[in-house]
Amino acid sequence: MAEPSERHRFRRFLYENGLSLFFLLIFLAALVAQALVGHHAYNADQAAHGEPTVSLWSYITSSSFGNAVMENWQSEYLQFTLFMLATVWLIQRGSPESKPVGDEGTESDRRQRIGGWAPPDAPGWARIRGFRSWMYSNSLLVVMVIVFLGSWFAQSVTGWTEFNSEQQAHGEQTLSWLGYVGSSHFWEATLQNWQSEFLAVGSFVVLAIYLRQRGSPESKPVGAPHEATGVEGSG
């Protein structure tokens, strides 16, 4: 039986990390569900064409499943990467997702608490100058771009493998990886994900000008005027 102090620490951990844990759990649940229904649909298609079915493990390690997952991952990370960059320089009057009008840009060292303006509890790389300070100042962007490029490359490889398998099954010509990446098949699958992500972000930015969700940091206070922008509306 755990000591009271250990239970308290565990409960505090759950409390302080509830948002990330919630999304981790529903992500895993959705991924498992996708694997199960995808496996069923894949085997149904195999049977309909008189081809052998596969085990669940064979399916989740296949290019078919990998491509379905990577198509969505790369578009999600592209969405957040572009949104993060756009909000540095562009503003949307009245949206809580925008900085206040006039605050465009990377902001001063004082406002960003860099170098001599860094408080005692600031991360070490925020208190120094040079490359390490620059790298830390852009570390979120760097990691997001790496994840996006990695998942996009994985999508291209799994999609290429799956495409060539289907071509071979129908006695048709296969493509090189570069040929597949330059094909309409690859870009149709890619762009159908991108356009939906861009629509979702853009509509949220605009809808949040006029609509509210009480208690959410992604919304302005219920009584904030429509023209209140960014932190202007969160007082």
Image (tube, helix red, strand yellow):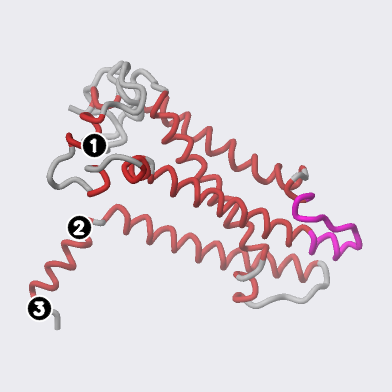
Q: Amino acid at mark 2?
A: Tyr
For label 3, the residue is: 3
The Cα atoms of the two marked residues, 1 and 3, are separated by 42 Å
The Cα atoms of the two marked residues, 3 and 2, are separated by 18 Å
Q: Which residues are magenta?
A: 164-179
Write down the quadrant of residue 190 in the picture. Answer: top right
Residue at the location (23% across, 36% down)? 114
Q: Closest to the observer: 69 or 89?
A: 89
**Is 167 in the magenta?**
yes
Image disc number at residue 114: 1
Q: Is residue 126 above or below residue 93?
A: below
Q: Secondary structure at mark 3?
A: loop
Q: Closest to the observer: 7 or 108?
A: 108
Q: x%, y% of residue 40?
A: 64, 68
Quadrant showing the C terminus = top left
Residue at the location (44% across, 33% down)? 85
Q: Amino acid at mark 1?
A: Ile
Left of 146 or right of it: where is 181?
A: right
**Is 114 in the magenta?**
no
For label 2, the residue is: 15
Q: Dot 3: few (<14), some (14–19), or many (≥20) neighbours within 10 Å?
A: few
